[in-house]
Image (tube, rainbow, N blue to C red):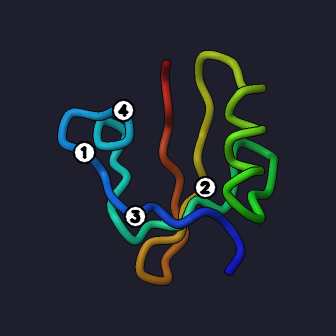
């Protein structure tokens, strides 16, 4: 599987505030493709105060905006 699958989301966490759900697969951050979880961590550290996550949810692609 390409991307990084969300396993769980704690209520009130940053992930829940941006709208991530268990089962979502994060496949990109801004213009970067995410091939596995290590890519996710590496690219998230490089981003600025605001970025977009490209996700797959139940076979449908979408974007979520993250503001730190």
Mark 3 to mark 2 CA distance (whole Å): 17 Å
Q: Quadrant of the N terminus?
A: bottom right
- Say if mark 2 contacts mark 4, CB within 8 Å: no
**Is disc 3 surrounded by few (<14), some (14 to 19) or many (20+) residues within 10 Å?**
few
Question: Which residue lies at the image location 24% right of the left edge and 45% below the top edge?
Answer: 10
> Looking at the picture, does residue 39 appear above or below residue 1?
above
- Residue that badge 1 annotates: 10
- Residue that badge 4 annotates: 14
Mark 1 to mark 3 CA distance (whole Å): 10 Å
- Residue that badge 2 annotates: 54
Secondary structure of residue under mark 2 = strand
Q: Is residue 38 left or right of residue 13?
A: right
- Of labels 3 and 2, earlier in sequence is 3
Q: Is residue 27 left or right of residue 22?
A: right
**Is disc 4 surrounded by few (<14), some (14 to 19) or many (20+) residues within 10 Å?**
some
- Say if mark 1 contacts mark 3, CB within 8 Å: no
**Is disc 1 surrounded by few (<14), some (14 to 19) or many (20+) residues within 10 Å?**
few
Marking on residue 7? 3
Mark in the foreground, 1 or 4: 1
Mark 3 to mark 4 CA distance (whole Å): 14 Å
Secondary structure of residue under mark 1 = loop
């Amino acid at each position: 599987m390409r991307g990084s699958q969300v396993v769980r989301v704690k209520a009130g966490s940053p992930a829940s505030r941006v709208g991530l759900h268990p089962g979502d697969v994060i496949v990109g951050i801004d213009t970067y493709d995410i091939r596995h979880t290590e890519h996710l961590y590496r690219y998230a550290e490089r981003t600025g105060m605001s970025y977009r996550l490209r996700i797959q949810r139940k076979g449908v692609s979408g974007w979520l905006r993250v503001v730190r």
